[in-house]
Amino acid sequence: MENKRKDWIFDKSQKELEKYCITSGFKKYGATQIMKWIYRRKTFDFAEMTDLSESLRKKLANNFCAETPKIVDTKYEEDSDGYSKKYLIKLSDGETIESVLINYRNRKTLCVSSQIGCKMGCVYCETSGLGFIRNLTSGEIISQILVIEDDIENKITNIVFMGMGEPLDNIAEVEKSLDIISNANFIAVAPRKITISTCGVLSTLPNIENHKYKIAISLNAADNITRSKIMPINKKFPIENIVKLINDRKPSIHNKITIEYVLIKDINDHIGNTKKLIKMFSPSKVKFNLIPLNKEKKSIYLKNFETSDDKTIADFKSKLFKAGFTVTIRFSKAQSVNGGCGQLKAEKIYSQ
Ligand code: SAH
């Protein structure tokens, strides 16, 4: 209970800790030292931070707590190429979030959540069915990585903001977390190994030109009528705005924008849509990631939707590929544990 009066150290940026060190009469560099202990050495007990003066260690212990959220449930799925593991994590206010680790071919990709629930209302996504509960803080985003690295006793190699929530609707906390996640002194996941996936909140994506992280945009339709039906955000930022933003960008082989396209039977999977997509985009600027709709058999929220047939998916891919685009199909891992894209929905099992 003592902790209630203390600040949570994981919510502090480097700048904020530098300011704290200076105003408390210590050297600015103390902040980097503290953060190296926490994020690189995973030492959360201030008393063990032996290169800090004793007075700073004591002061930190008086002012900050460094408790990590707790993993309260996991679900594991394995196949011949690797495994995925879905984590239910309980935050300090009792809310729970989900993160999914996808461990395939030496890559350990963590799909992190940025919000509890979501405001965006995309009709094919289970998380939308939860409504919006609250934003995660930067510390809550970062601590998903910390507790899962601790669980697997290994480093995460890639991060995707494709868990619960819309990262660009919580951009300040997401950017604050990324400063620590991508800092080579701290969590050290390189920016090119970090993907921010957005449904297209373009107001917070102004400097796409200089973005050091990978950007993925969930397009999911080739015309505004369809897109507005399945993604309410399209009424505010329609397809032509997305296309303009992307096409105004200089081509970059190393940092193409990924266009995500969830294939939903008879809604957006007509082969004629590929023609429109080919006209809209250039292979030098985007690549496509086709995602067959994930659906839990019992889903109430997705009851009107079905996954496209295998042949339709293959034809869609082939048309785009023949037009020169790089196309991948994301057969979501972790589906049997409901950890696939759009399936993350923290059940409030501890709230009763
Ligand atoms: N809000 C962000 C990130 C979360 S969704 C976004 O919309 O991009 C991450 C990815 O999962 C997106 O590409 C989204 O289109 C996809 N997705 C959502 N629900 C899905 C479902 N039921 N089946 C397959 N993919 C889904």
Image: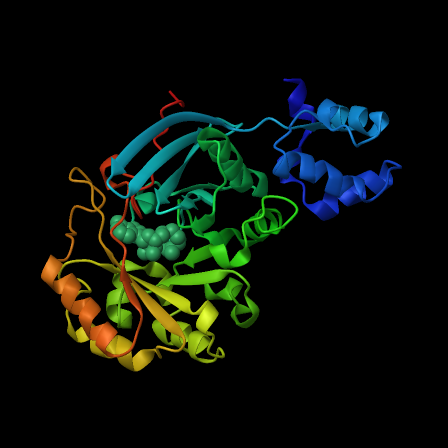
Q: Quadrant for the N terminus, please.
A: top right
- Residue at coordinates 48% horizontally, 31% vertically from top-left? 153
For residue 121, say whether it is visible.
no
Quadrant of residue 267 in the image?
bottom left
Q: Position of residue 177 (x, y in %)?
A: 58, 47
Furthest-top residue in this view: 1
Query: Is 323 drawn above or below residue 196 in the view shown?
Result: below
- Name the residue: 36% across, 42% down: 103
Residue at image location 76% in from the left, 24% down from the top: 62
Q: How is the image coloured?
A: rainbow
In this rendering, the count of numbered labels is 0
- The image quarter containing residue 326 is bottom left
Of 36 and 61, the residue lying toward us: 36
Residue 149 in view, yes or no: yes
Quick check: 174 left or right of 162? right
Q: Residue at x 33, y 46 (%)?
A: 128
For this view, does 230 lie left or right of residue 113? left
- The x and y percentages for residue 338 are 27, 38
Task: Give the position of the C terminus as an image quadrant.
Answer: top left
For this view, does 339 lie left or right of residue 211? left
Kindly give the residue lying farthest to the right in the view shown: 25
The image shows residue 310 at horizontal and vertical percentages of 12, 58
Tell me which corner region of the image, top left, top right, bottom left or bottom right, holds residue 76.
Answer: top left
Q: Position of residue 87 (x, y in %)?
A: 39, 33
